[in-house]
Image (cartoon, rainbow, N blue to C red):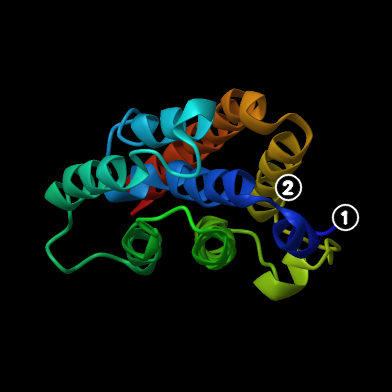
């Protein structure tokens, strides 16, 4: 099943996890530490929180922490895309709003990985999300797999899948941090 189809079928928790995972993997671009989004992950895992719980409060705390680390306006395109993901996060975990956010985060995260990958990838991000994987650059291919895995974990395991989705995201964050570090050394 393509990423586009998985997003279309996902429930509110799966969508929130998908958007959050994309944002979480891009935290190194925002200068945040690895724990800054942990309270939002906890909110998703807490079945007693209902559809949202204290999501809005935890989101504002994360925004505050990451905005405090904001660049001086001279950020490059990848950092701007990551910052837009954070800014666009809905304060309510309403399915319609979260679906739009998850979809936008998916596109932005794939575009970030595409910009950071030195390999050429002539196909559009949209074609990759729809299932066109031929000739895909390695960094983009790995990000696409992570996005699909997160949605499959939440669809298959509900709240119990949040922990596994966080592990997938953590792995992706480490990869992106290494790519950013290598890029900085070469610059």
Task: Give whichever of 12, 31 is nearer the camera.
Answer: 12
Quarter of the image where the C terminus is located? bottom left
95 versus 57 height, above or below: below
Q: Position of residue 27 (x, y in %)?
A: 37, 44
Asked whether residue 116 appears in the rendered view, the answer is yes
- Report the side of 151 relative to 79 (left or right): right
Q: Position of residue 74 (x, y in %)?
A: 19, 68
* Residue plotted at (40% across, 55% down): 92
- Report the side of 146 relative to 82 (left or right): right
Q: Secondary structure at mark 2?
A: helix
* Residue plotted at (36% across, 36% down): 37
130 versus 65 height, above or below: below
* Residue plotted at (40% across, 65% down): 81
Q: Earlier in the sequence, mark 2 or mark 1?
A: 1
Q: Secondary structure at mark 1?
A: loop
Asked whether residue 31 appears in the rendered view, the answer is no
Quarter of the image where the N terminus is located? bottom right
* Neighbours of disc 1 within 10 Å: few (<14), some (14-19), many (20+): few
104 versus 148 height, above or below: below
Task: Give whichever of 61, 74 is nearer the camera.
Answer: 61
Q: Mark 2 to mark 1: distance in Å?
A: 9 Å
As drawn, the label of residue 1 is: 1
Identify the residue position indicated by label 2 in the image.
148
Q: Position of residue 169 (x, y in %)?
A: 55, 35
* Residue plotted at (67% across, 50% down): 11
Residues at discs 2 and 1 in contact (Cβ within 8 Å): yes
């Amino acid at each position: 099943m393509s990423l586009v189809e998985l997003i279309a079928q996902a429930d509110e928790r799966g969508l929130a996890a998908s958007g959050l995972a994309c944002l979480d993997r891009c935290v190194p671009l925002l200068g945040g530490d690895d724990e800054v989004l942990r309270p939002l992950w906890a909110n998703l895992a807490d079945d007693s929180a209902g559809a949202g719980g204290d999501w809005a409060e935890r989101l504002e705390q994360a925004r505050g922490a990451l905005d405090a680390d904001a660049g001086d306006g001279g950020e490059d395109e990848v950092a701007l895309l990551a910052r837009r993901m954070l800014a666009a996060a809905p304060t309510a975990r309403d399915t319609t709003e979260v679906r739009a956010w998850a979809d936008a985060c998916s596109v932005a995260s794939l575009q970030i990985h595409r910009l950071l990958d030195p390999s050429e990838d002539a196909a559009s991000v949209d074609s990759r999300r729809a299932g066109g994987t031929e000739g895909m650059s390695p960094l983009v291919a790995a990000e696409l797999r992570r996005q699909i895995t997160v949605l499959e974990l939440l669809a298959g395991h509900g709240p119990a899948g949040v922990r596994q989705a966080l592990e997938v995201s953590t792995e992706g964050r480490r990869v992106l941090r290494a790519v950013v570090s290598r890029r900085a050394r070469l610059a």
